[in-house]
Amino acid sequence: MEHLEYRMEAPDGKTVAVKPFSLVGVVASANLEVMLEIVPSEKACVFLIDTAAKGFEASWQAVVRDFMDRWKPAGLKVSINDNAASPSVVSLRLDQAYEALTGE
Amino acid sequence: MNLQNIGCNYLEASARKRLEGILDPGSFRELCPPTEKRISPHLHYFDIPVAFDDGVVTGEGTLDGKTVAVIAQEGRFMGGAIGEVHSAKIVGLLRRCLAKKPDAVLFLFDSGGVRLQEANAGELGVAEIIRAILDVRAAGIRVFGLVGGSCGAYGGAGIITGCCDALAVSEEGRIGVSGPEVIETNMGVEVFDSRDRALVWRTFGGKNRYLQGQVRELVEDSMESFRQAAIRLLSLKPDYSLDQLEAEQKQLEERAEKFAGCRDAVDVWRKLGYPSPENIPSLTVAELKSEGGAK
């Protein structure tokens, strides 16, 4: 297992949540779970990632940065348990979790 | 395109989706939610990823207006296997029922049994769940099981199904103690060929369990069928009178005697009086029931 942590801030970021947290996906083979929680006092987003696939830090960083660019969120705690999902699956799960959280 | 109808079958739904589909809309309230991150303390030794809910969702809600405590296992996380935290969540919810007195407990099974990485903790967990279910039933609260997930209910989970008041099962949901591959490994391929899917389904599948009288409700694999079956189960009244228990014991003895020597489920169905038992696997639930069903 590998643990990764990122802290990112989107300029003029904003998140309006319709519920306190969202959870999507299941930790199955080549799949992952993504949990989003609202941290109202924070501007930055924190990503806490536990992954079974070691050595893919560059990919994780790119996927997380894409997510930040796409949604411009703020005040999120993103927790991920990953069982070697591909970057595209991770990206889709992040979007799915964000849509569930914000009702978009 | 109507997105509402996508993924409405029970087999492929996640544990959370199942609860959403079975309970009254919006009534589910989770206890020990994933935000508490009560994860397995064992899996990191094996370099295996954890899940925030440890593969089981617990909580309460209403079903047809009645209050129910609910347990839903997630078969896609480690085969829904029962580990230490997984079982502690279930036991905690069941013990809570003694104080809260819901109308019933719904247990949505989807589990291959004990999580091997957590060996003894998992085994103890199964024993504690069984004890907790019996306590809840003794307090007059009924416990109903739904089996329709891809992992079925095997090993310890299979035993737990036997401790419930009644079960609703789809043909796809299998119930057993030793799984097909375990039997093949121990007894030989000539006794049980685990790669013969038709054999596996007609032995462990919901249809055979229904015809043998182990299952109250045989249902089609859809969320609505399971919901309606669960509502019908709620109307069952517990009867633990001596007469009832003795009748049940007698029925089990007769079953063991009547079907002794049967080599295949088809032999069992023939003895049950079906004129063309070899056709049973291809019948729908409705067709099977119109042919006389179980008992």
Image: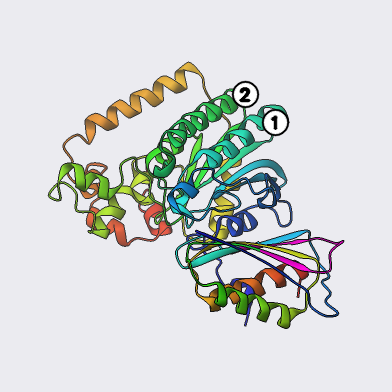
User: Which picture quadrant has residue B283?
Assistant: bottom left
Q: Position of residue A61 (x, y in %)?
A: 62, 75
Tag 2 near tag 1, CB within 8 Å: yes
Residue B191 seen by the camera: yes
Let me know if residue B137 is in the magenta part: no
Horizontal placement of A79 versus B169: left or right?
Answer: right
Going from N to C along the chain, the mark reached first, 2 or 1, is 1
Q: In this view, does B36 lie above or below B172?
A: above
- What residue appears at the point 27 percent right and 42 percent down from the top-left corner? B272
Horizontal placement of A99 versus B191: left or right?
Answer: right
Let me know if residue A35 is in the magenta part: yes
Q: Which chain carries label 1?
A: B
Q: Residue furthest left?
A: B190
- What residue appears at the point 60 percent right and 50 percent down from the top-left corner? B53
Start-end of magenta stretch: A34-47
Mark 2 lies on residue: B139
Q: Which chain carries label 2?
A: B
Mark 1 lies on residue: B101
Q: Where is residue B5 in the image (x, y as percent from the top left)?
A: 59, 72
Q: Nearer the viewer, residue B274 or B278?
A: B278
- What residue appears at the point 26 percent right and 50 percent down from the top-left corner? B181
Question: Could you give the CA–CA distance between mark 2 and mark 1, rounded to whole angstroms?
Answer: 9 Å
Q: Do the residues indicated by labels 2 and 1 lie within the same chain of the protein?
A: yes
Q: In this view, does B201 lie above or below A58?
A: above
